[in-house]
Amino acid sequence: MPRWLPAFLLLILVLPAWVLPAWAQPAPEASTGRQEKAEALAERQMVVAAHPLAAEAGLAMLRQGGTALDAAVAVQMMLTLVEPQSSGIGGGALLLYWDNANKKIHAYDGRETAPAAARPQRFLKPDGTPLPFREAVPSGLSTGVPGAVAALHLAHQAHGKLPWASLPAPAITAAEQGFTVTPRLAGLLAREQRLRQEPAAAALYYPGGEPLKAGTVLRNPALAASLRRVASDGAAALQHGPLAETMLAALAARGSDMTAADLAGYQAKSRAPLCGTFRLYKLCGFGPPSSGGVAVLQILKLIEQLDPSPAPGLAIADLHRLVEASRLAFADRNLYLADSDFVPVPLAGLLDPGYLAERAKLVRMDASLGMAQPGEPPGRRGQRPGLWLHDGPPGTSHVSIVDAWGNAVSMTTTIEDAFGARLLVGGFLLNNQLTDFSFLPSLDGRPVANRVEAGKRPRSSMAPFVVFDPQGALLGVLGSPGGSQIIGYVAQSLLLLIDKGLGPQAAVSMPHIGSRNGPTEIEHGADPAWAEGLARLGHRSQSLEMTSGLHVIWRRTGAGAGQWAGGADPRREGVALGD
């Protein structure tokens, strides 16, 4: 490795995206227009998902007497068909389930794993420099063992009421009869170049060599056949038999080292949820391999230290606190977080009240930190594990569900990049999740926490959350796609919901602001006064598209108390539906 490379790589952690080298520039799911939406209300049950057909499929399961988990399975199967750029059965998911009868929250990890043959140098060229991201994605090396179906199947065994075999039915019907291509899908297909070079995908999405137009009816009989196998065999459909063999053959042709043993050996995991408090509320998210839960909780706890008595309205001081807390959280996240089955993560130390109180003292209300340094949390063992230097793009979706029994699902699901690895098998796209690992295995002689290792799950920023009121009752569920910006999207929404009293639709519609320990990122279209006010505090701001997909369900208080209110992000095509 050239002697200058470690210092250069450390520098790019704080540079704006437009000056990053090509290997570090994943293309996000593009903005395809804003659709203002009204807040939805429901008395008993609600589904918020990224496509109307997906929300309808979930609500149909609830109306048949199913649980929130039953509905989540139906939603995921439908998203595979109608939102192929974002998630599907060829990807992974992190799922939180609130069991209201037993007053217990469960966390199901369906994150993809690296094949047994994977080594830390997986994404290095012969000269030791990182492979360009756009070369890595379709190389065959990028696909991890899919886990979304396995996680849903494991959770269904514990929390489902309807037969598993019945849950993919709406998606199977839509795949056979066809669905209407939306403007968002049409726009993303038109922008995409690599997908049209893959024969099966080209035949489905680019008939005659042209991308599908909005309003076209698209049928996907191959996916219907795959979903029938999933309906009959559950997670085993992707781990053994004809569909698994077809996946392996397609991957091998791309240079993948995934084997039948890798597929057969995959296991979704039941993990302990990561819970903390903010104000008088209990918030539960996901721990490693996700960095999302701990980073969101750090941001909120730092703000609690800095702003013990929040005032109504959103002032420049509120924005400054949010951005500075985000810098501190990302500094720790970038250093310490990875798959805790492989790397010692000082999780308790990162959320230790004394540690966070000391970190909060670094924030000045009259000047920005600029770039924060990582801290020394209690419980850190041995050498620091090292920085990871690659953040995946937002090819992801989020699902929020509450059922008539008061159970709830918060699930973030992904194939990583928009259209994943650009490899269509059985009518669905395979993920490129392994590019969420650091391309560099070490930096300055220190191992990188998020290095590639056999069987390891790549670090995630997904941040599904379940929120409880001061009396311990379910208050809401939320989450978002958006790559590493998920953390800021979710933290800001929780602040708006809890501290500022906004309803869910108003909260998700608010322009975004945050920092990943680099520039202060402000969404295009935000009030110019934000940038002007923060500039006086020394913030270096960057205006950019911030294509979140926040989906929130929140219990109303005051007028309409007890009703569920739903908010669907206006930046995408999601809807909130309920009874």
Image (cartoon, rainbow, N blue to C red):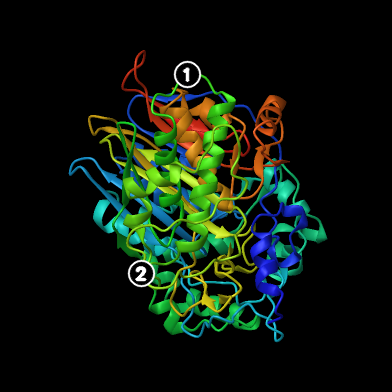
x then y, percent, for residue 513:
60, 37
Q: Badge 2: how crowded within 10 Å, few (<14), some, or many (20+)?
A: few
Q: Quadrant of the C terminus?
A: top left
Marks 2, 1: nearer the viewer = 2
Q: Is residue 61 left or right of residue 220?
A: left
x then y, percent, for residue 121:
59, 82
Pick whichever, 186 or 438, lies toward us.
438
Q: Quadrant of residue 250?
A: bottom right
Question: Which of the two discs, 2 and 1, labels the residue nearer the N terminus?
Answer: 1
Pick whichever, 291 or 3, lies toward us.
3
Q: CA distance from mark 2 to mark 1?
A: 42 Å
Reading the image, the residue beneath label 2 is: 381
Which amino acid lies under the numbered mark 1 shown in the image of this protein? Pro
Q: Is residue 360 left or right of residue 508?
A: left
Q: Is residue 516 above or below residue 427?
A: above
Reading the image, the residue beneath label 1 is: 312
Q: How many marks?
A: 2
Q: Is residue 379 above or below residue 50?
A: below
Which amino acid lies under the numbered mark 2 shown in the image of this protein? Arg
